[in-house]
Image: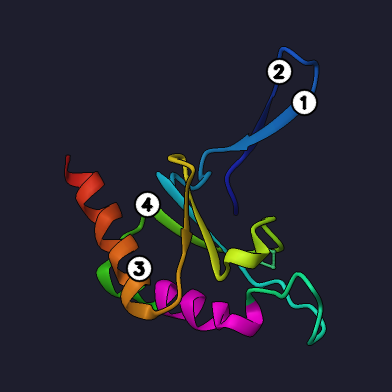
Amino acid sequence: MGASPWKFESSSGHQTLLYEMYPNFKYHVFICQNQRPEGHPLGCCLSKGSDTILNYMKARVKELGLKNIRINKAGCLGACKHGPTVVVYPQGDWHTVQSVQEAEKIIQHQISNQSS
Ligand code: FES
């Protein structure tokens, strides 16, 4: 059966559930997958190939066995004109990623961060 949850109450009074098997990701990479109709003044990341970036990064992180990096789909991140938009936390590093080569640079940067 799954892990048993336990509760704690935060200083703001909210109850939070934690699990023994709560994933221990060090980095979260959010990749905008928002889609807007063609011709929309803000544009969107999906029309600029953000799905290719997402699929590439997911595959590479898995291939490299980087279990502490989580690649996540995101809705609009509010930087539409600069997309495809990628943000990496906890650093809060924002990127425009227009190719898988640029996506690879982000992954390699995260790897080098882990060893430092
Ligand atoms: S559509 Fe991607 S940041 Fe807004």
Image location (x, y in percent) of residue 30? 55, 58
CA neighbours of label 4 inside 10 A, class few (<14), some (14 to 19), many (20+): some
Q: Residue furthest bottom?
A: 38
In the rendered image, which residue does mark 2 sit on? 10
Q: Is mark 4 within 8 Å of ligand 1?
A: no
Work out whether 44 lies above or below 11. Answer: below
Image height of 115 relative to 106, above or below? above
The answer to whether the residues at label 1 and label 3 have Cβ atoms under 8 Å apart is: no
Identify the amino acid type marked 1.
Gln
Distance between the Cα atoms at labels 4 and 1? 26 Å
- Say whether disc 2 or disc 1 marks the residue closer to the N-terminus: 2
Q: Which residues are magenta?
A: 46-58
Q: List the residue tagged with mark 4.
A: 68
Residue at image position (20%, 51%) is 112
Residues marked 2 and 1 touching at CB (< 8 Å): yes
Q: CA distance from mark 4 to mark 2?
A: 26 Å
Provide the residue designation for mark 3.
61
Per the model, the C-alpha gap separating discs 4 and 3 is: 9 Å
Give the residue type at disc 3.
Val
Quadrant of ligand 1: it is bottom right
Density class for disc 3 (Cα within 10 Å; few <14, some 14-19, many ≥20) is some
Scheme of image coloration: rainbow
Task: Name the residue rendered at 40%, 79% in the picture.
Answer: 99
Q: Is residue 9 left or right of residue 98?
A: right
- Taking the spot 72% from the left edge, 75% from the top edge, the residue there is 43
Magenta stretch contains residue 51: yes
In the rendered image, residue 26, in percent from the top left (x then y), is placed at 40, 44
User: In the rendering, at what x and y percent does residue 73 appear?
Assistant: 61, 66
Label drawn at residue 15: 1
